[in-house]
Amino acid sequence: MVRVFCGSAQYLLSFSKIWILIGIISITEAQDFPTSSGNHFSYPTDNIHLENFVLPHNREVSYYLLHNKSKNFFFEVEESHTPLAIKVIPCASRLEWNVRLLRGGRKRDTKQRGGKRRKKILLESFSGHDAMTFERENSRKGTYMLQIIAMDSDTIIKLYATTNPEFDLSYPSIPPDDRVGITAVSKRSFSLAWKPSPDANFIKTLKYCVAINRKQHYKTHCSLSSHLYGDVKPTFPPGWGFLFSSEVGKKKSIRQKAKPIKPVRSGSIVYTCIGNKTHFTFKKARPGRTYLVDVFLVNNETNLSSTYSGSTVRTRDAHQHLVLQDGKLFRKSIRSRNVPEVFHFEVNKLTKELLIFIQPCSGSVNLKVGIGANITFQAKVDVQKRFILKDVEPGLYLISIYGARGQHFRIKAKTGVHRLRYPKLPARTEVRILENLTTCNSITLAWMGTKGKQTYCLYKRTQLEENESKTNKKYNQCLTPTKTMQKIQCTKLRHRHSGRAVVSQKVTDLQPGVAHTFDVFVRRGRRNYLHYKTSIAKTKDVCDK
């Protein structure tokens, strides 16, 4: 029974709304009529049609959905063969929704009040976080019903319907290639670029906005807004509803059931608008982190937006783990004194022997070998050394090298040591100048060899290289022959006893009083060299008579 209204104006307003409702009842089923559920309500909007869940033409409207509670919306197409587009934009939650056409006729389980029966023809279903559009080039005349449910949480949704999609310029256009490209990546920054909107030349109110975070992609601009700022419980515009006193309790109940999402932690989303620029550099990244990037195109005048396809970028690690290949020599330098250079070496099966070869170019380094958190072996290395681990279990081994910043070293790991062909240096790597044999045009040198068959090569140069210490106090084991070096002679020798392995070489045809730099390299194979300490010697100024 209808109660007496407090004033004639209130009565007339409510009476007019009742006639609107009666008009909708004539085209829908009573059991599906939206206001009967009492679970959903309008998000603040200036569009009175949405109070009755009827979508207006060519205008975006918002609505607040409760979690896991479906709601029906309606749109009327007055003529057949009319193009139709209905767009649904989710914000805080993933949506599942479908579009049905309400048609006349009889159906067993679809009964309207008064005995009338209607058909609901399912046309298409949708699911996801993206803004999605139901489109038909030649739609039928009739009432189209959208059934929408929020799957993850309460959410605001945005709805837009038009029968003029070809000429509708409400939402800014995204180019066909809507990818956000990563143009540069470093440890603490990365750069983005994307193609401009086709509308950019004739719509001057467009702007590009960039969102960067480490948790998820935001498929719509309103999704970003909901997570960045949080949603609020819905409020009702003045005059909402039919002004019955029973609706006061309904509004209160609706607000009590609403659980809008809260904003994310401050600083977890970086959001900035950059005007009409189509490139952006983020300079506050951290090394070795993955970032998710979304770019939005927003019309400042209408506040309508479109979204580019998001991208994912990972900054370079401050100390990236490198993979050692079995038997491959790796050259590296230490980037930080307190942080090791870490290498991965995978052993696929039980191995009798694993060789780890380490050669500091100068000074000493500390070597640690482990699997997981367990240290298998560790040692301090002053000159090139090889370590053989016995009965090695399969697994991923971490080889860590500690040393001074800028220090160079070589490293090699190999299973099956008997196949290794690599030169060896003796414990004493000095190249001695035999002063008593030095003349005005010749210098004789001698150095220790090692046990086994190796090739010893002597090189001469008249100047020190730029990267060597002119005082000749810094020993560089990693030095290799260069174009500025003149090869004197290579000698292949085999020694049975390392203590007796002495190699000597006389260099002749030199000029009196000239200083020369001599380098000795030991070689096995064609590419693997090890370097003795560099020596400097000067011929006598005057030749003996």
Image (tube, rainbow, N blue to C red):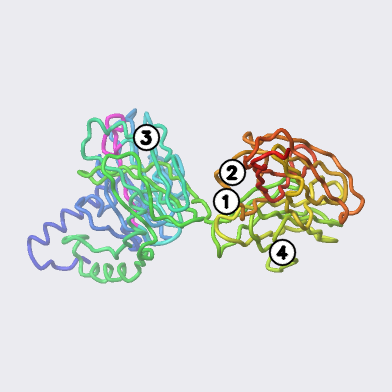
Asked if the stretch drawn in magenta spans residue 165, the answer is yes
SS category of the residue bearing label 1: loop
Residue 431 is situated, as x and y percent measured from the top left of the image, at 73, 50
Q: Which mark is residue 370?
A: 4
Q: Earlier in the sequence, mark 3 or mark 4?
A: 3
- In this orientation, which residue lies closer to the viewer: 216 or 181? 181
Q: CA distance from mark 2 to mark 4?
A: 40 Å
Q: CA distance from mark 1 to mark 4?
A: 36 Å
Foreground tag (2 vs 4): 2
Q: Earlier in the sequence, mark 2 or mark 3?
A: 3
Q: Callout 1: few (<14), some (14-19), or many (20+) C-alpha neighbours within 10 Å?
A: few
Q: CA distance from mark 2 to mark 3?
A: 54 Å
Classify residue 47 as left or right of residue 490.
left
Q: CA distance from mark 3 to mark 1?
A: 53 Å
Classify residue 137 as left or right of residue 368.
left
Instruction: Single out the residue that lies furthest toward the front.
Output: 545
Q: Callout 2: few (<14), some (14-19), or many (20+) C-alpha neighbours within 10 Å?
A: some
- Dot 4 amino acid type: Gly
Q: Which portion, as a residue range, is magenta?
A: 156-172
- Report which residue position mark 3 lands on: 195
Q: Earlier in the sequence, mark 3 or mark 1?
A: 3
Residue 94 is situated, as x and y percent measured from the top left of the image, at 44, 54
Q: Earlier in the sequence, mark 2 or mark 4?
A: 4
- Report which residue position mark 1 lands on: 469
Q: Earlier in the sequence, mark 1 or mark 4?
A: 4
Q: Residue at x 34, y 49 (%)?
A: 221
Q: Which mark is residue 464?
A: 2
